[in-house]
Amino acid sequence: MNKKVLFAVLSVVLIGLLVGAFFIYDELYEDYTHSNFQMQTVDKDENKNDGTAPEPEQKHEQEHEQERTDNMVPDVEFYDADGNAVMLSDFFDKPLVLNFWATWCGPCKSEMPGFDRLYDKYKDKVNFVMLNVSDSEETVADFIKENGFGFPVYFDKTQIASYTFGASSIPLTFVMYKGGEIYGYQMGVLPEEALEEAMKTVITEE
């Protein structure tokens, strides 16, 4: 077998392997993005008893204050699409969904249609902060327009928010009660059904 024939055979085999790998990846990725993941909820620490039992009303107030202190998120600054600085606490007037994402992130893009549907459904009851971690405003604007998304987009230009929340891997989503107390989080793709369940919880317990 001469070199040209051998090269042609190897090329056909390589192309076949690549095509097969693509379809296998696509099938696995489809299963991954639609798996029934559950959001990781944050446990509320119980108060330590120093031997003095408070009255029931006082105990309830102490426990509530301790829970909120333990699970409150740090306040961080980022920017809106017009370049204005905003604080995370600006969104604490309602329950909050905070999502770290980028246009180059395949898993991020796979969950966005669900986020957009839930934003449209619950935007009067829940604030959404879709925080882009690395893209330019122009890139994001083109991406949002191309996909017809309606949720508000913000930019972590200083990377302070990403560092503070440990968003070294994206997507990363937090769901919070009104006031900034964490209900739960998800590292990786968060299915629409799981996100809606979490949102209903924070709305109910508002």
Image (spheres, helix red, strand yellow):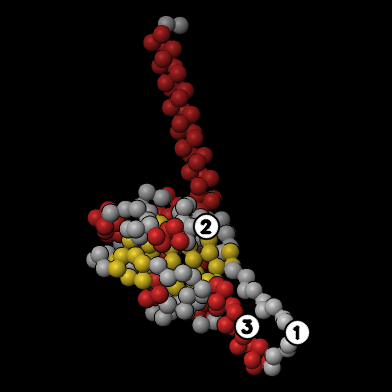
- Relative to the observer, which residue lies in front, 73 or 200? 73
Disc 1/disc 2 C-alpha distance (Å) = 40 Å
Q: Is residue 118 visible?
A: no
- Relative to the observer, which residue lies in front, 83 or 30? 83
Disc 2/disc 3 C-alpha distance (Å) = 29 Å
Q: Are marks 1 and 3 in contact (CB under 8 Å)?
A: no
- Relative to the observer, which residue lies in front, 91 or 141? 91
Q: How many tags in the picture?
A: 3
Looking at the image, which residue is at 59% across and 69% down?
42
- The x and y percentages for residue 180 are 47, 75
Dot 1 or dot 2: first in sequence order is 1
Q: Secondary structure at mark 2?
A: strand
Q: Is residue 25 left or right of residue 66?
A: left
Q: Secondary structure at mark 3?
A: helix
Disc 1/disc 3 C-alpha distance (Å) = 15 Å
- Relative to the observer, which residue lies in front, 177 or 20? 177
Is residue 182 shown above or below 31? Answer: below
Dot 1 or dot 3: first in sequence order is 1
Residue of label 2? 187
Looking at the image, which residue is at 46% across and 69% down?
74
Residue of label 1? 51
- Amino acid of disc 1: Gly
- The x and y percentages for residue 174 are 49, 66
- The x and y percentages for residue 87 are 36, 71
- Amino acid of disc 3: Glu
- Amino acid of disc 2: Met
Residue of label 3? 63
Dot 1 surroundings within 10 Å: few (below 14), some, or many (20 or more)?
Answer: few
Dot 2 or dot 3: first in sequence order is 3
